[in-house]
Image (cartoon, rainbow, N blue to C red):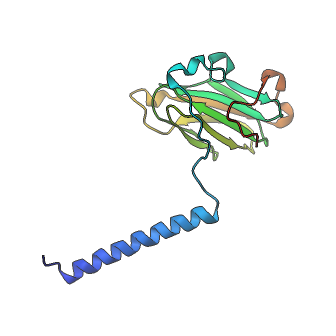
Amino acid sequence: MHIDPREKAWVYVSLILVAFASAVVLFTAVSANIHPPSNVETIDSASLHLSEEFAEDRLGPRITEDGRVVVTMVAARYAFYPQRVEVPANTPVTFRWATPDVLHGVHVAGTNMNTMVVPGFVSEVTTEFPRPGTYPFLCNEYCGLGHDYMWSRLVVVPQDQWQPDQVQAGPNPPGDRGQ
């Protein structure tokens, strides 16, 4: 099979560009300590609403026994539950997500909070919101015809105005590593 020398040269240039781009991504990930979430915790999606942590009356923010703020939420077609969550500013907040149906993506617009919610697994992400305000939770993974309506509201209030009595104290979630 005859390959034109110029065509061969472009194949080499393309391979060099792919190798260079891969090296840049790898170097950036290693130097900035970027890695995929390491919380591998499984859950039975079919009985999610019957579980101790993700039952409807247990959703929302709470303070764990060691004083951390943990928000438990469910992403389901086509909404996030609870619909409104209030957390303190400048405080580490751990979000724990689960879904009973399909793959969802959660993004809090204007912040660095972004994760995927995979059926059968608990997604956990810890972040801090430096500025008080109201932010939307948006699904950034197409999950079906009602995807456009999948949103919720995150209200970040100044730390001194956050009412801890609005949350329920509870034990550390199962699988929690207590950061």
Answer with left or right where residue 128 lies relative to residue 117.
Answer: right
Locate residue 116, reporting x and y percent: 53, 40
Between 141 and 99, the residue placed more toward the observer is: 99
> Which quarter of the image is occupied by the N terminus?
bottom left
Locate residue 118, reporting x and y percent: 50, 36
- Residue 74 drawn above or below residue 158: above
Kindly identify the residue that appears in the image at 51 percent across and 25 percent down. 45
> Which quarter of the image is occupied by the C terminus?
top right
Number of marks drawn: 0
Q: Where on the picture, by quarter, is residue 5?
A: bottom left
Kindly identify the residue that appears in the image at 62 percent across and 17 percent down. 56
Between 123 and 71, the residue placed more toward the observer is: 123
Locate residue 147, reporting x and y percent: 44, 30
Q: Where on the picture, by quarter, is residue 4?
A: bottom left
- Residue 130 drawn above or below residue 29: above
Between 129 and 10, the residue placed more toward the observer is: 10
Kindly identify the residue that appears in the image at 46 percent across and 38 percent down. 141
Answer with left or right where residue 146 lies relative to residue 47.
Answer: left
Locate residue 55, reporting x and y percent: 63, 18
The residue at the far right in this view is 160
Kindly identify the residue that appears in the image at 53 percent across and 26 percent down. 44
